[in-house]
Amino acid sequence: MLQNIVVAGAARSPAAQGIDLEEKTVIEVEAEHGKVMKTLQALEEGYPGAGSALLPLFFPGELWPEERTFWSTKRSELEEKKHKRVAGKTGIP
């Protein structure tokens, strides 16, 4: 039980949440008043992984079909980018 308390309270870098940011990075996104999904999509466009990391927090349920399409496309792009980065580091195609 003590281990769970330590793990839950431990500080994590944004990279641990799938958001590759340098320390003290300021994220600027033009938010639309009352349009959380549009704001998260704009965040995802500028900072891949950041919007998708926040998506379950604001939208824990089902998404509209066009929203599912957007997020699945972005997830695929991010996975492809990660795969290329790992392949480049290891030399494995």
Image (cartoon, grey):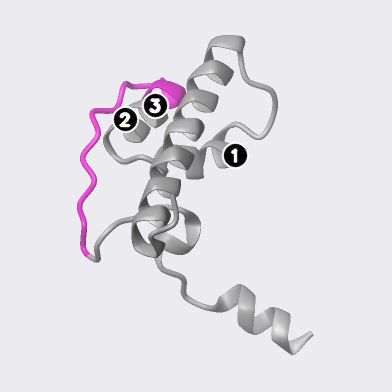
Residue in the foreground of this view, choosing between 9 and 92: 92
User: Around disc 2, counting alpha carbons within 10 Å, would you say few (fewer than 14), some (14 to 19), or many (20 or more)?
Assistant: some
Residue highlighted by disc 2: 45
* Badge number at residue 41: 3
Of callouts 2 and 1, which one flags the residue occurring earlier in the amino acid sequence? 2
**Residue type indicated by callout 2:** Glu
Residue 34: x %, y % from top left: 41, 21
Q: Secondary structure at mark 1?
A: helix
Seen in the picture, residue 34 relative to 75 is either above or below; the reply is above
Q: Are marks 2 and 3 in contact (CB under 8 Å)?
A: yes
Seen in the picture, residue 27 relative to 43 is either above or below; the reply is below
User: In the rendered structure, does residue 37 fall within the stretch colored magenta?
Assistant: yes
Seen in the picture, residue 3 relative to 27 is either above or below; the reply is below
**Residue type indicated by callout 3:** Gln
Q: Nearer the viewer, mark 2 or mark 3?
A: 2
- Pick the quarter of the image with the N terminus: bottom right
**Residue type indicated by callout 1:** Pro
